[in-house]
Image: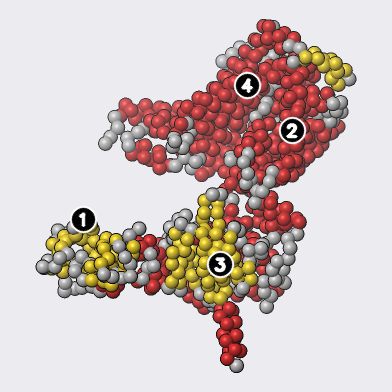
Amino acid sequence: MVAIPAPPDRQKPVDWLMDKLLSGQGVWPAVPAILILVIVAVIPFVMLLSLGFSDFSVSRGQIIDQTFSMRHLGNVLTDPLYWTTFQRSMSLALSTTAICLLLGYPVAYLFLIGGRWTRRAILIVTIAPLLTSGIVRTYAWLVILGGRGVLNNALLGMGLIDQPLRIVNTHWAVLIGMVQIHLPVMILPLIAVMSRHDRSLEEASANLGASRMGTLRHVILPLSAPGIGTGAALVFTLSYTTFVVPQLLGGGNYLNAATMIYEQVVYSLEWSKASVMSLLLMASCLVVLVGIALVTNHFTRWTRGRQG
Amino acid sequence: MTLARDLSLASAADAAQVLRIDKVSKRFGTFTVLDDCSIDVSEGEIVTLLGSSGCGKTTLLRCIAGFLTPEKGAILIDGRNTIPVPVNRRPVGVVFQSYALFPHLTVEGNVAYGLKMHGVPRREIARRVADALASVSLRGFETRYPSQLSGGQQQRVAIARVLVLEPRVLLLDEPFNALDAKLRGTMQVELRELIKRLGMTAIFVTHDQEEALTLSDRIAVMRGGRIEQVAPPDEIFDRPATAYVADFIGLSNFIPAEVRDGKVTLPDGQTLATEAQGPVRVMIRPHNLRAIPQGPGPWQGQVRFQRNVGPLIEYTITAGQSDMHVVALRRDRIRPWGEGDAVSLEVIDPEFCKVYPEA
Amino acid sequence: MRLPDRLAIGDLLGTATIVALGLFALFLLVAPSVIVLIISFDTRAFVSFPPQGFTFDWYLRVFEQRVLVEAMLNSLQVGITVTLLCIILGVPTALVCVRGQFRGTTALSIFVLIPHMVPGIVLGVAVLFAAAAIGVSPSIGLQSISITVFVLAVMVRTLMSRLQRMDPALEEAAANLGASPFQTLRTVTFPLLMPAILAGAVFTFIEGFDNISVAIFTHGFRDRPLPVELLALVQTTNTPLVAAVSGVQIVLAIVALILVASSIGLDGVND
């Protein structure tokens, strides 16, 4: 009979360490991650901040002769070109967010009322695009919206138009592409919130005399407010700061803030302007995110615990 | 000769004592969860730690298992202090409230787990796993995963998983909580029989007094981190050491009274000798009271509520300022009292009343 | 109690509108990929629809283009590096964030999650400038580490939600049954975390493979990753070659999806 071995052999060092890890004693297991985040995210960001407020020159990909200056910030803020660019980015991102919500919410509702297989299908259709690259998905729209693209061919074929519509390289092409590319990002948080719903809430609502739409408006919609907030924040951030879609579907002359930064960094090497633009991009993005958070907060008071 | 016999007696007594909890105290921050707890448990005994939530019963169990380290006191298993022994080297087996079956291992994998960790040879493992599964009647379930088992089967796997290691002490943390009420009763009896058959020493933690009364050789009633009384179920019920125990176990009537000349006078006029002094509370169990047709007796009341509990009839009788609980055996020929009936109350046996000092 | 009929009709219309919008949105999600797949088999040398004929030519050509193959290999390398780094850094970090017995675990988890909220383009620009300041030139290494910082949050979040739902009694049970802390980690904690690690790995790999917002600023001058190469290709050519590259990616995506679904179930993805 093999009985329990005699107690206690002194713990091995590795066990001592693992015990500390499993029982959450000390920060040390997270130190490598913290270090890398500090070196590759915090320090670069501080540097970006300092570059935005200084004069310097770039030589052979290296920064030299850095001195403090507000000149570039002033230049950007006083140049109407930058204002219109940011305005364009902002209105594009806001309308993308709004349309994504308008199209994404019904999908989430279908998920809510759907059975097992409907839910599965919706998840597959929503997640699969996230796994392919944004460029591939944007390229698809070039194919669809192009002069000899799917849409024009179809419209011509049906005799609805005489000559191909010019859609690519317009604001509309960019908007359509943006919406389609960011739609999954809106749908997923909505589904996440809705799948946590208690079905008996809808039954209770119906039992109390609410119609389907009444239930949707007074029960489901308020309950999904957190998901709407998350989805809106994600879609806004992504669509406000992407340069792939505008670059491809807007043609070379459609500028939003992101494409502008890209050109300043890669082609015109105006790094001070790019720093200032990046900072402004992030700051303005943050302002909108705070706005979204405040609105969401207002509509999700019920999620907070009892006061006092 | 006599000396030798005394020595052997002493060592026999020592050997019989498997677990000794000696003045154990434990704090979480500034909050004292265990306060000077002591219990001795002898070989083959089943002891229940009983109390409402937050009384420290689970904390004490976790101290024995080694998941928590008490600040003061000692926990001895077979005479050895286990406090410095790491969790994975203690000869105790824990059956968790959630069973904590490893979801990624089969029934066989779960039961074999501990043997593997102890470096038992493979062939030996197979044999002992088979034996353990047989002892809980789970042969044929080897390749199932925990999620494919019923609650009762999961519980049996959790038990087999620790039994296979032949621990000195079995610790069970509310093991019936996850089962539905009907299954609970039969599983309690089955589990007690299994533990007795294997001669295991076991400690149960529960908040359910019925469970404690069913399972235990002795019950330790806990309150606010202290052990109020350790005694066999009958003694706990019939001679509760404190008013709290009396109130916690079973239904009780408490009547305020005054001690005069070492005696307490009950409302029906009978007297009871006591060592207590000053204002006291007298505890009378409902089955020690009788409702009789209204007569000249000093204790008059009116039936406020009655209900039928199978073989028993429960009455709530308003007598003066207070409501008294009375339980009577149902008998064919006696018509139960109805609501509103006027009755007299009397204590059947004053010796069964307990007197506690006024808190 | 019966509802008035007028209300019922309004209800029906409302429901129908929502269902129609939802179906349209789902169509919108699927259609482009399907069209790209169809075009990738076209025999003509320019993109047009509907296609005429069927050929695997473009797929073969993808693998004949050295630039594209090299870009794929580069991206593959970045994807694997990012995934491994995220696992190595993410598992201990998630454990600390969930189990940490000290103040500041919330602050720590926010700190780890924030880089993912910063626009990728801003992170990319910042890393590029910082590297330039200390004389480090962009490379596969720089690109990998930047994307790691960007997506570490995804891995940590997936692991955290799994850890939070894990019954703490499981590890106690392992210890009680005689497992040393290291054995507990190896036989209980790690296997139970595996589905979350796998799900996180799929997403971090895809981000490493496909990311462009960070990659375009940090990639090595000669080691261009696939998305950067593709961006240039899409802007300069109008052959179904790009569609074929897309086709390859779509197939890879489906494989990844099946991988995730079979390991944690589709519902697990959406945590």
Q: Residue at x 68, y 33 (%)?
A: A132
- Residue on which disc 1 sits: B321
Q: Chain of mark 1?
A: B
Marks 3/1 same chain: yes
Q: Residues within 10 Å of mark 1 (few under 14, many from 20)?
A: few
Q: Chain of mark 4?
A: A
Above or below, A210 against B65 in this view is above
Tags 4 and 1 on a common chain: no
Of badges 2 and 4, the one in the foreground is 2
The disc numbered 2 marks a residue on which chain? Answer: A
Q: Is residue A250 above or below residue B277?
A: above
Residue where numbered disc 4 is placed: A285
Q: Which residue is mark 3?
A: B22
- State which mark lies toward you, 4 or 1: 1
Residue A38 disc label: 2
Label 3 chain ID: B
Q: Nearer the viewer, mark 3 or mark 4?
A: 3
* Observer able to see residue B183: no
Q: Position of residue B347 (x, y in %)?
A: 22, 70
Residue type, numbered disc 2: Val
Dots 2 and 1 on the same chain = no
Q: Secondary structure at mark 4?
A: helix
Mark 1 belongs to which amino acid?
Gln
Q: Do pointers 3 and 2 mark residues of a single chain?
A: no
Counting from the top left corner in percent of width and height, residue A97 is at 57, 23
User: Helix, strand, or loop for circle 3?
Assistant: strand
Residue B232, x across and y down, in percent: 43, 73
Quarter-wise, where is residue B318 in the image?
bottom left
Image quadrant assignment for residue C155:
top right
Secondary element at image label 2: helix
Indicate which disc, 2 or 4, sits on the residue closer to the N terminus: 2
